[in-house]
Image: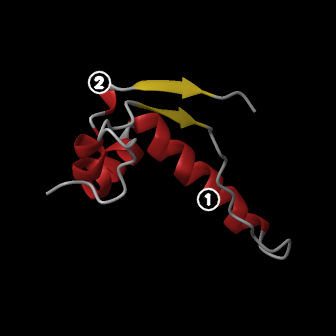
Amino acid sequence: MENPVALGDDEGDRVRGGLYLPQPTYFFVTPKRPELAKRLTIGLSALVDSGALGEIFTKYHGDNLRRTRLAGRRIIKLKT
């Protein structure tokens, strides 16, 4: 199935690259629950350090990422 959001010019050429702008993700915790904030920090750090976060992400988004064929595209990384 063809990607319905693929961009192209009038000649039918597809975009062969993209822009990457890293964006942080935040979790806000009430100041009344500092132990929850600490536990979230410890737990998420452990997921990242062990590689489990990447595995979970790939489990749910891997098929979509493979369809993008990023390895064959020129990606421009923008600095923040």
Position in image of residue 50 (x %, y %) = 40, 37
Q: Callout 2: few (<14), some (14-19), or many (20+) C-alpha neighbours within 10 Å? A: few
Q: Is residue 79 left or right of residue 71?
A: right
Tell me the crowding category of disc 1: few under 14, some 14 to 19, or many 20 or more residues within 10 angstroms, Cα based.
some
Q: Position of residue 4 (x, y in %)?
A: 30, 60
Amino acid type at circle 1 is Leu
Q: Residue sitting at 86 percent across and 71 percent down?
A: 31
In front: 18, or 53? 18
Residue ID for mark 1: 40
User: Can you identify the residue that label 2 sits on?
Assistant: 72
**From mark 2 to mark 1, how far is it between C-alphas?**
36 Å
Residue type at tag 2: Gly
Q: How many numbered marks, from 0 up?
A: 2
| Nearest to viewer (mark 2 / mark 1) | 2
Q: Position of residue 35 (x, y in %)?
A: 72, 65
Question: Is residue 23 depicted above or below 71 in this figure?
Answer: below
Left or right relative to 17: residue 29: right
Give SS at disc 1. Answer: helix
